[in-house]
Image: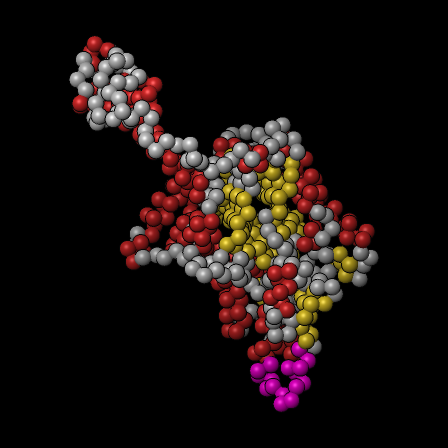
Amino acid sequence: MGCIESTFDPEDKEPGHDRATKEVATPTSDEQAGTHKPPSFENVPSEPIDSPQASTTTTPDAVSKAYSPKLQGVAAMIDTHAAIPESESVEDLMIDANAVGMDMQTINEDEEHEHKTTAQDDDDEDEDDEDYTEDKFNKDMTMYEITDEMSSNLEQLIADKVAEIERKTKFVIVQSSASTKAGLKDGQSKTNQDSSFMHDRLGPQGVLQFYGVCDGHGPSGHNVSQYCCEHLSQLLIKDNERILTTLCKPAYALMIAIEELDEKLDAEKKSGQLKFDMSASGTTLTCGLRVGNHLYLANLGDSRAVMGHYDANNKTRVRVQSKQLTVDHDPTNQMEADRISKSTRGKLVDGNARIHINLIDDKFAKPRQSVLELKQTYGVDALKQLNAVSASVSRSIGDKVAHKYGGVISKPDIIIHRLCDNDLFCMWASDGIWTVIDNGDVTRIIGNKLKTCTEQKSYADLQKLTDKVVKEAHIVWQDEFDDYVDDITAVVVRIASKQLAHSQE
């Protein structure tokens, strides 16, 4: 079964669309072999085969090509040279049903069953096909409106939607683990600015599953990352209206929750509830929300989500491959660099590896700005300490100076991945891993172990395996960078069938 990933970048706009999309589809084995083609009508005759107008006699084989299922059933009962009327009404035929051992009720019941089966198959096919269309992705990202009539019946609507999701779900996350290790600065352990969250059961009846990693940076980066991990899941289920939105339009709900998270930080900072400064501090965010058979991912910054999956063309299912689900947001990404170059003060330095923003002009230019204005613009810490701000990511939450002047934004990419039986695990991790270990090596470390327990509900050493990946990255940092090691955090989840999840070991 093929899998699809649909990527949404709110910065891109197209006429006629509220939101623009980028779609990347992983082809099925047939498509890769070049056998999956759109239907062709070049050789279809303009008139039906064995048209009744052309002949009043035919055979059952010919009838099967030209007439309805009901008439096919009749044709099988009568003599091959019997007359077929021009209409397809069975009532036009006078047949002794007893003589042929079949009554008309049987024919009608068989046709009704066939129509129902076909209709059901069509519904299933339509549902599957929808997952591969750009239109469905656009629909998922449009606003979900709760009407007054719906508001009066929210609890029942939620219960019905939960039941529908449970009925259709084939794949779930059966196990999860997280590991983190603080970095080193000048050879000494420093504050770990990474944070993570794991919600194996979230929302009504635990129907949602939600995981993610935040990588903080700047003087208060650890505070920002912790705040995001603590509050993001709450925003997805903050009230019944939001719960219904999350169940019905997860991609849209995830987008709105991240927007509200950024706004919530600003509001609480202005009201004095937050005691940490965000003028030059912020965090990345990469996360995944499972609803039904889909994984809805959001990404800001250079933390990353990678899927370990079997090669669909390898029937032995021995080799586990990596699939990067998210795009890193840093100045080396040309689309990101273009936006930064157009910003008020953002300049690309160090070979386009960093964003540099000069603040001195605002502080000392004549006529000088008021202290109040500077505080409102930069924050107290920035006013006292900073002459410039430097950033290595082009999207983040927080980082108010970089957002205002440097082209850094807080709008995430949204990715929709349809889970399938080739998916083995997914890993969200900070760049402390991806800087020194590539996707393939991470996938081999984890995949070679997990592929041996695909029929097990629980893998006893998943935590040890996650710890091993983090430890390996820490060692590589020490080997390659003398006295500096980045903070390292990873969340790993196992993906399996719902049947396995509900089995007894």
Question: In the rendered image of this protein, does residue 40 appear above or below residue 93?
Answer: below
Q: Which residue appears at 46% of the width and 46% of the height?
A: 133
- Count all numbered tags in the image, as a single digit: 0
Towards the viewer: 245 or 353: 353
Residue 364 in sight from this viewpoint:
yes
Towards the viewer: 193 or 439: 439
Q: Would residue 175 appear left or right of 43 to someone viewing this image?
A: right
Q: Which residue appears at 68% of the width and 35% of the height?
A: 448
Specify start and end residues of the magenta stretch as a single range: 359-374
Q: Looking at the picture, how far across and down is residue 306, in whole percent?
A: 62, 46
Residue 181 in sight from this viewpoint:
no
Q: Residue 82 colored magenta? A: no
Towards the viewer: 81 or 179: 81
Q: Residue reaching furthest top?
A: 99
Q: Looking at the picture, how far across and down is residue 384, in whole percent?
A: 67, 79
Q: Looking at the picture, how far across and down is residue 12, in whole percent?
A: 52, 60
Q: Which residue appears at 22% of the width and 17% of the height?
A: 83
Q: Which residue appears at 70% of the width and 77% of the height?
A: 387
